[in-house]
Amino acid sequence: MHQEIARESPGGNAELKVSRVPFSAIPHQSRLFLEYQSNPRSLRTYYPNVTSSPSELVPYADEVLRNYTTDRGLLCDALMDVNVSIGAGPKTVENIDILRADSTVAVVTGQQAGLFTGTLYTVYKALTAIKLADQLCSAGVNAVPVFWVATEDHDFEEVAETFVIGRANELVQLQYSPRDHVKGSPVGSITIDGSMAVLSNELFEKLPATEFSGELRRLLASAWAEDSKFGSAFAKTFAGILDDRGLIFIDPMDERIKKLAAPIYADAVRRADEITERVGKRNREIKSEGFHSQVLVEDDYFPLFWHNDEGKRMALRKGSDGLYRPKGGERRQFGLAELEHMAASDPERFSPGVVLRPVVQDYLLPSVCYLGGAAEIAYFAQNSEVYTTLGRPVTPILHRASFTIIETGHRKTLDKYDLALTDLFDGLDATLIKLAETKISAESARLFAEVEENINTQLHRLDQRLSQVDPTLAANLATRRRKIIYHLAALRKKTLLAEVRQHETVNRRIENLFTSLLPNGELQERSINVFTYLNKFGPKFIDWIYQSIDLEDKDHRIIDL
């Protein structure tokens, strides 16, 4: 399938070409995710409110509104302060006011607060939520897009680095290491120090200088200023690049948001044993069907993290005596009644674990849908049991838009060597060898094929003779034959790679392909930062992505720029 979308280019109007690749053709996709994409209704046991199309969300909005009990006024007051503080535009403010109405639902997505917004798929999530909210509004449903900034997550190493493609098409890693970071503390509590300015400057030293670089540099300097909080910097950057598309940011660490979440926290504590039992049972069911469980839930599991006096986020585990103790050496212990009272009266001391977080999110927000990635879809099969245990409707989940960006130069390389994106999934060496066989070193490839055929012919003759003399000698020959063929194949690979790498232009162009399209050996969207493309194409890049989102398309999409 090919789609063409009009876009403005420096030379005038051009066409944005969009094609697609099924996820089944992309390596390392889980069976559960693939089945959910192809036949979601077959998994209704795990996803009670499953939808096969965004249009099916329209009637579900009524159920969401019937079950929503959070005080919208208090929620929206907190959201207003959070969003105004990060410089969100008038449309976001308008959407917060729309959310105050009892008839409004939320299209929700979210992600950890990543360095300079993190990976491209975080941007794709946000734009998918905006597009779905727009579509629901067109269908007569009052809907606003909301982005849950996962500031409570404590795996800072996971969000402290990002990658851009540099001036010479090299993959550039940028990593932030704050001086006073307390390991295990929530990401949102980290205070940015002066070294961030150095890192921001390094980003623009690595990127090519363009007409857009100055404005982007100013955005990062403002958002990631010294003494700012990491989570706020992430949201402020996001708000800046989205250019007032109405996305509402929610920070679960906000004190007022915490207080609104207190009832669901307390209920989760009260039913902790039931949650653990039911999720554990669900995991066993998933595995018995041949799927994998995304989140390990053991018998001593507790659905909330506890925050100690230093702000460190610590998992609680149930002991054989029925008391709960923090992992990691903190000498504290709690009874269930004490934890329930603390969750209700002092919710700032808690944050939800991965199986509870969606339920908390959808208790706070009138969520008509959550837009997530493949891993999130997989663990929704487990945490649907948490929704049911806590008496909440199970929020439908849909996959967010997924893209690979192919720039003109890389498209020319693909076309010149008759390659498709799927060919690259075999890896760099396999791709180079394929080129050597078909384009560059066909003579060497034919020679190795002839030699292998001759060796096999002669070894077959020898096998027949040895079988007559002594069958054990034939068995010994079979072992040695495998070794001969193995070593010949290894020599063939080395030879073809050596020959293709002598062609520096070809080798460089193919390596550049992998840097851009499969950096770090994975889909581009999982590594590359959006500033790579904003710096080249400016704010129109966000427009092109938004235009390229097809909510009915469940495949991975390829955009040719």
Image: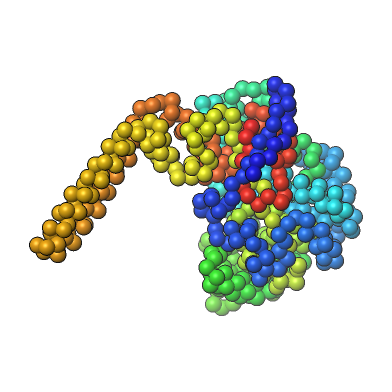
Can see residue 236?
no
- The residue shown at (63%, 57%) is 37
Q: Left or right: 509 with respect to 255?
A: left
* Nearest the eye: 225 or 14: 14
Percent x, y of residue 198: 58, 30
Q: Residue at x 16, y 53 (%)?
A: 461
Q: Position of residue 392 (x, y in %)?
A: 75, 68
Dividing the picture into quadrants, the one containing residue 105 is: bottom right
Q: Could you tell me residue 7's position as x and y percent?
A: 73, 31
Image spot of residue 142 (x, y percent): 86, 53
**In the depicted view, which residue is nearer to us: 116 or 424?**
424
The one nearer the camera, 195 or 45, is 45
Task: Please tell me which residue lies in front, 417 or 203.
Answer: 417
Q: Is residue 244 above or below residue 215?
A: below
Quadrant of the drawing holding the N terminus: top right
Q: Residue at x 77, y 36 (%)?
A: 243
- Residue name at image x 85 percent, y 52 percent: 139
